[in-house]
């Protein structure tokens, strides 16, 4: 049910939240290398009186809009555009707000030939290096590396009916069972819901949605998300920039932590799990 609500065609998109939360938004386009990618929208504006830089996936709502925005599946030029905007934010000391809503990065042959994996990796690296506050909000689907490319943040917020996972349930089912009909079982195993990810410490806060989902009252959903973003920024303002960057990196190193009696405390496992030293 949560996956279906996260994908609801009337669910508020990035541009909707920008309209509710960001004053004087000025969109910036292009990666200054190849092309403009409508699947990623970004620019400058004011969040509750504070200048910020905003970047997010844009799915569109009607079929025509979804076609233009490629259903929120960005190509390499989209992630390179995001990198350009992150650099702009760092130069001018602007907090970064991202909105994640994508089934994943575009998997087409042309995108792969154009360096999709590298573009995603460099976007993640660019976010990890920022000294300005970074708050990411999962507002719909948060799928795979396409989502993580905009979610290497100090605080990751998640709307109550959003999802966030390494692959779609259908994709997981196709790999494990060779049958997309097993998607419900895959979704249960992936634990993609906000409450599950909060328990796993993959997100910092879950933002309540209006009854039935954010699409029933987008303005109220935006107000609640805005309050959560404001609170996160207030917390991050109390942390020195270099310490904030170190904490951000450590946050992601802790994800997937596991215990191994054969592994020395404080070392990393083959699979990226981090075992901290005993207190």
Image (spheres, rainbow, N blue to C red):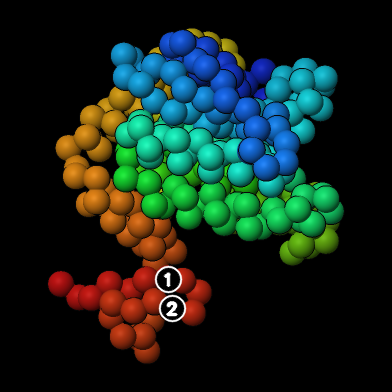
Q: Is residue 193 left or right of residue 110?
A: left
Residue 94 versus residue 21: which sits nearer the camera? Answer: 94
- 81 above or below 42? below
- Mark 1 burial class by Cα count in 10 Å: few <14, some 14-19, many 20+: some
Q: Position of residue 225 (x, y in %)?
A: 41, 23
Which residue shows up at 29% across the image and 31% down it?
A: 233
Q: Position of residue 197 (x, y in %)?
A: 45, 47
- Among the 4 quarters of the image, the one containing residue 204: top left
Residue 174 versus residue 133: which sits nearer the camera? Answer: 133
Residue 195 versus residue 83: which sits nearer the camera? Answer: 83
Q: Position of residue 147 (x, y in %)?
A: 58, 44
Task: Please state, as top left, top right, bottom left or bottom right, where the C terminus lies in the image.
Answer: bottom left
Q: Are marks 1 and 2 in contact (CB under 8 Å)?
A: yes
Q: Is residue 55 left or right of residue 277?
A: right
Furthest-bottom residue in view? 262
Q: In the rendered image, is residue 100 in sight? A: yes
Q: Report helix, strand or loop for mark 1.
A: loop
Which residue shows up at 52% across the image and 12% down it?
A: 19
- 250 above or below 41? below
Q: How many marks?
A: 2
Q: Is residue 86 left or right of residue 180?
A: left
* Residue on which disc 2 sits: 269
Task: Please state, as top left, top right, bottom left or bottom right, where the N terminus lies in the image.
Answer: top right
Q: Position of residue 140 (x, y in %)?
A: 58, 32
Numbered circle sitting on residue 273? 1
Residue 194 versus residue 43: which sits nearer the camera? Answer: 43
């Amino acid at each position: 049910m949560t996956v279906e609500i996260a994908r609801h065609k009337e669910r508020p998109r990035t541009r909707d939240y920008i309209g509710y939360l960001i004053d004087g938004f000025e969109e910036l386009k292009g990666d200054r290398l190849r092309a403009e990618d409508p699947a990623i929208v970004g620019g400058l504006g004011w969040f509750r009186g504070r200048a910020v830089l905003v970047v997010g996936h844009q799915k569109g709502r009607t079929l025509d809009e979804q076609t233009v925005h490629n259903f929120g599946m960005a190509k390499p030029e989209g992630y390179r555009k995001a990198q350009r905007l992150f650099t702009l934010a760092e130069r001018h000391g602007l907090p970064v707000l991202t909105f994640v809503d994508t089934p994943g990065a575009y998997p087409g042959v042309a995108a792969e030939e154009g360096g999709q994996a590298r573009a995603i990796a460099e976007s993640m690296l660019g976010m990890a290096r920022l000294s300005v506050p970074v708050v990411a909000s999962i507002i719909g689907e948060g799928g795979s590396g396409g989502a993580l490319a905009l979610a290497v943040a100090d605080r990751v917020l998640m709307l109550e009916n959003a999802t966030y996972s390494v692959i779609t349930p259908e994709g997981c089912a196709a790999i494990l069972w060779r049958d997309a009909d097993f998607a419900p079982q895959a979704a249960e195993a992936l634990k993609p819901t906000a409450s599950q990810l909060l328990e796993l410490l993959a997100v910092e806060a879950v933002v309540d949605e209006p009854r039935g989902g954010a699409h029933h009252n987008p303005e109220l959903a935006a107000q609640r998300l805005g309050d959560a973003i404001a609170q996160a920024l207030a917390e991050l303002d109390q942390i020195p920039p270099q310490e904030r960057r170190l904490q951000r990196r450590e946050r992601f190193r802790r994800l997937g932590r596991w215990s191994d009696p054969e592994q020395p405390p404080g070392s990393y496992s083959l699979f990226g799990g981090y075992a901290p030293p005993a207190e």
